[in-house]
Image (tube, rainbow, N blue to C red):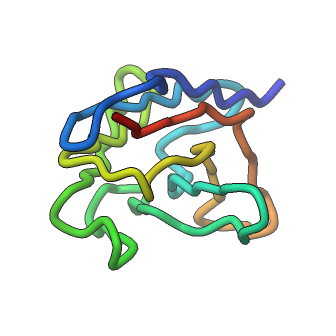
Amino acid sequence: QVQLVESGGGLVQPGGSLRLSCVASGFTFSSYAMSWYRQTPGKERELVAAITSAAAIKNYAESVKGRFTISRDYAKNTVYLQMNSLKPEDTAVYYCNARSIVVALLTYWGQGTQVTVSS
Protein backbone atom coordinates (compact mmCIF):
# COMPACT_ATOMS: atom_id res chain seq x y z
CA GLN A 1 0.00 0.00 0.00
CA VAL A 2 1.10 3.55 -0.71
CA GLN A 3 2.21 5.42 2.38
CA LEU A 4 3.56 8.89 3.09
CA VAL A 5 4.61 9.26 6.71
CA GLU A 6 5.53 12.72 7.99
CA SER A 7 7.58 13.44 11.08
CA GLY A 8 9.57 16.26 12.67
CA GLY A 9 6.80 18.60 13.71
CA GLY A 10 6.54 20.10 17.16
CA LEU A 11 6.67 23.28 19.22
CA VAL A 12 9.37 25.82 18.46
CA GLN A 13 10.01 29.45 19.41
CA PRO A 14 9.91 32.24 16.83
CA GLY A 15 13.23 32.37 14.98
CA GLY A 16 13.84 28.68 15.54
CA SER A 17 14.20 25.83 13.06
CA LEU A 18 12.61 22.47 12.33
CA ARG A 19 13.19 19.81 9.68
CA LEU A 20 10.19 17.84 8.49
CA SER A 21 10.62 14.42 6.89
CA CYS A 22 8.27 12.41 4.69
CA VAL A 23 9.09 8.75 4.07
CA ALA A 24 7.44 7.30 0.96
CA SER A 25 6.67 3.66 0.21
CA GLY A 26 4.51 1.62 -2.16
CA PHE A 27 5.37 3.48 -5.36
CA THR A 28 8.34 4.47 -7.52
CA PHE A 29 9.63 7.51 -5.65
CA SER A 30 11.77 8.78 -8.53
CA SER A 31 8.71 8.97 -10.82
CA TYR A 32 6.80 11.38 -8.57
CA ALA A 33 7.02 15.09 -7.91
CA MET A 34 6.90 15.79 -4.19
CA SER A 35 5.54 18.76 -2.29
CA TRP A 36 4.61 20.14 1.11
CA TYR A 37 1.29 21.83 1.88
CA ARG A 38 0.02 23.40 5.08
CA GLN A 39 -3.40 24.19 6.51
CA THR A 40 -4.80 26.10 9.49
CA PRO A 41 -8.44 26.11 10.69
CA GLY A 42 -10.66 28.24 8.46
CA LYS A 43 -8.09 28.56 5.70
CA GLU A 44 -7.50 26.72 2.43
CA ARG A 45 -4.69 24.24 2.20
CA GLU A 46 -1.78 26.06 0.57
CA LEU A 47 1.27 24.89 -1.32
CA VAL A 48 4.45 25.59 0.62
CA ALA A 49 7.17 23.97 -1.49
CA ALA A 50 7.50 21.57 -4.41
CA ILE A 51 10.30 19.61 -6.04
CA THR A 52 10.24 17.86 -9.41
CA SER A 53 10.82 14.14 -9.83
CA ALA A 54 14.47 14.60 -10.81
CA ALA A 55 14.98 17.46 -8.32
CA ALA A 56 15.77 19.81 -11.21
CA ILE A 57 13.27 22.48 -10.16
CA LYS A 58 12.07 23.73 -6.79
CA ASN A 59 9.18 26.11 -6.14
CA TYR A 60 8.21 27.93 -2.94
CA ALA A 61 5.34 29.99 -1.68
CA GLU A 62 6.28 33.67 -1.54
CA SER A 63 5.79 33.70 2.22
CA VAL A 64 8.52 31.10 2.83
CA LYS A 65 11.11 31.97 0.17
CA GLY A 66 14.55 32.33 1.68
CA ARG A 67 13.50 30.56 4.87
CA PHE A 68 12.40 27.06 3.79
CA THR A 69 14.26 24.51 1.66
CA ILE A 70 12.81 21.36 0.08
CA SER A 71 15.04 18.42 -0.84
CA ARG A 72 14.77 14.70 -1.56
CA ASP A 73 16.91 11.63 -0.92
CA TYR A 74 16.30 8.87 -3.47
CA ALA A 75 18.20 6.23 -1.50
CA LYS A 76 15.92 6.80 1.50
CA ASN A 77 12.69 7.54 -0.43
CA THR A 78 12.40 10.65 1.69
CA VAL A 79 11.55 14.29 1.07
CA TYR A 80 12.54 16.97 3.57
CA LEU A 81 11.44 20.47 4.42
CA GLN A 82 14.05 22.49 6.29
CA MET A 83 12.32 25.41 8.00
CA ASN A 84 14.42 28.26 9.38
CA SER A 85 13.56 31.63 10.91
CA LEU A 86 10.14 30.34 11.85
CA LYS A 87 7.31 32.79 12.51
CA PRO A 88 4.03 32.37 14.42
CA GLU A 89 2.17 32.55 11.09
CA ASP A 90 3.96 29.35 10.03
CA THR A 91 1.87 27.47 12.59
CA ALA A 92 -0.16 24.84 10.72
CA VAL A 93 -0.57 21.17 9.98
CA TYR A 94 1.96 20.29 7.28
CA TYR A 95 1.12 17.61 4.71
CA CYS A 96 3.35 15.68 2.33
CA ASN A 97 2.07 15.12 -1.23
CA ALA A 98 3.23 12.90 -4.10
CA ARG A 99 2.11 13.26 -7.73
CA SER A 100 2.97 10.98 -10.64
CA ILE A 101 5.07 12.62 -13.34
CA VAL A 102 3.26 10.61 -16.07
CA VAL A 103 -0.29 10.31 -14.66
CA ALA A 104 -1.26 13.48 -12.81
CA LEU A 105 -4.37 11.91 -11.26
CA LEU A 106 -2.15 9.53 -9.31
CA THR A 107 -1.60 11.62 -6.20
CA TYR A 108 -1.16 10.69 -2.54
CA TRP A 109 -1.27 12.52 0.79
CA GLY A 110 0.34 11.96 4.15
CA GLN A 111 -1.50 12.21 7.45
CA GLY A 112 0.01 15.55 8.44
CA THR A 113 2.30 16.76 11.21
CA GLN A 114 1.62 19.73 13.50
CA VAL A 115 4.04 22.66 13.59
CA THR A 116 3.48 25.28 16.28
CA VAL A 117 5.59 28.44 16.46
CA SER A 118 5.01 30.29 19.71
CA SER A 119 6.89 32.02 22.50
Q: Position of residue 37 (x, y in %)?
A: 57, 57
Quadrant housing the N terminus: top right
Residue 38 or residue 110, whichever sits in front: 38
Residue 5 or residue 27, whichever sits in front: 5
Q: Position of residue 106 (x, y in %)?
A: 78, 58
Instruction: Place residue 21 in its image quadrant.
Output: top left
Q: Residue at x 60, y 68 (%)?
A: 46
Q: Position of residue 67 (x, y in %)?
A: 20, 57
Q: In the shown orientation, is residue 92 left or right of residue 79?
A: right
Q: In the shown orientation, is residue 117 left or right of residue 34?
A: left
Q: Is residue 76 above or below residue 30?
A: above
Q: Is residue 90 above or below residue 62?
A: above
Quadrant housing the C terminus: top left
Instruction: Place residue 59 in its image quadrant.
Output: bottom left
Q: Residue at x 29, y 33 (%)?
A: 13
Q: In the shown orientation, is residue 50 left or right of residue 99?
A: left
